[in-house]
Amino acid sequence: MFFNDRREERADKQVVELDNQQIPQHIAIIMDGNGRWAKGQNLPRVAGHQRGMEVVKDITKAASDLGVKVLTLYAFSTENWKRPETEVGFLMKLPGKFFDTFVPDLIANNIRVNVIGYVDQLPASTQKAVQNAIAQTANNTGMVLNFALNYGGRAEIVSGVQQIAQRVLSGEIKPEDIDENMLSQSMMTASLNEYADPDLLIRTSGEERLSNFLLWQIAYSEFVFVDEHWPEFTASVLKRAIKIYQSRHRRFGGLSENKSDKK
Ligand code: IPE
Ligand code: IPE
Ligand code: MG
């Protein structure tokens, strides 16, 4: 165990040289593997969530230091209600625990909290913790720490389409006025403006699926899957993922990296 820890520490100190001109502006992470990590340590699943919360603090600071504009973290999906009541209960208490200790750091680092998802369906105390953190960091102008809480990509698209349908029904717009931009504007990420779509999507724990995350927004995101469980994720794993991103050739359907390239 001791030997392992030291080896991990050494591996973690591997220097990853990044191109500072090509830091992904919006990174989205599917934080997966908390339960499996805990099981591997002979701990209850919730111990993985607890440890995962501490990792969120480290990665938030690391991303902010790297100059990332938006960090979106998938914390609870619209499908996670299927889990045992005790686990759901624990997860609902995490935002309160997280912000209780971390808001001063967020303020010190000029980080603003934002949330996407059906927050109104969360327990009142969870809603309160989230709303307080949003209000306390509202004037910060640095990175946006965007939590996906009770979020589901399909539900988000359905809600967006319903809003647009209402506007058609009221005569404000015609069906032919509906375009991609209008759909983007009706997504929960609309307030992120030019950073609404992730450049880089990371999933931890070796699983390679989206689990209903940001379906509309990831049309041209780069995907990086890492084997580490979320409680094992470090700033150096983040840098490794960004390094992989920087080695990719984004073409957006064209021939070069330039989005407006028409050659
Ligand atoms: C991710 O870890 C956290 C949430 C989904 C809330 P999991 O709890 O999914 O951990 P595994 O995938 O079961 O190991
Ligand atoms: C996705 O992980 C949701 C979050 C990380 C919050 P899950 O663990 O819920 O996904 P599945 O069930 O393995 O697809
Ligand atoms: Mg999982």
Image (cartoon, rainbow, N blue to C red):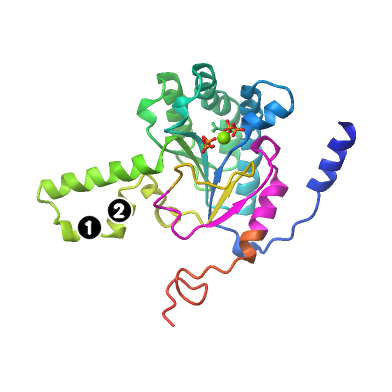
Q: Quadrant of the C terminus?
A: bottom left
**Front residue (pair 6, 101):** 6
Q: Most extreme residue toward the bottom, as rendered?
A: 263
Element under disc 1: loop
Q: What label sits on residue 178 in the rendered view?
A: 1
- In the image: residue 81, left or right of residue 37: left
* Residue 236 is one of the magenta-drawn residues: yes
**Front residue (pair 64, 226):** 226
Q: What label sits on residue 40 in the rendered view?
A: none
Label 1 CB, ligand 2: below 8 Å? no
Quarter of the rendering containing residue 53: top right
**Front residue (pair 119, 218):** 218
Residue displayed at 70% across by 48% down: 237
Span shown in magenta: 215-243
Q: Are marks 2 and 1 in contact (CB under 8 Å)?
A: yes
The mark that comes first in sequence, 2 or 1, is: 1
Q: Most extreme residue toward the left, as rendered?
A: 171
Residue displayed at 34% across by 47% down: 187
Ligand 3 picture quarter: top right
Q: Quadrant of the N terminus?
A: top right
Q: Position of residue 83 (x, y in %)?
A: 50, 24
* Residue 213 is one of the magenta-drawn residues: no
Q: Position of residue 81 (x, y in %)?
A: 44, 26
Q: Amino acid at mark 2?
A: Leu
Q: Amino acid at mark 1?
A: Ile
Residue displayed at 64% across by 56% down: 242
- In the image: residue 63, left or right of residue 181: right
Q: What label sits on residue 183 in the rendered view?
A: 2
Mark 1 Cα shell of 10 Å, populated few (<14), some (14-19), many (≥20): some
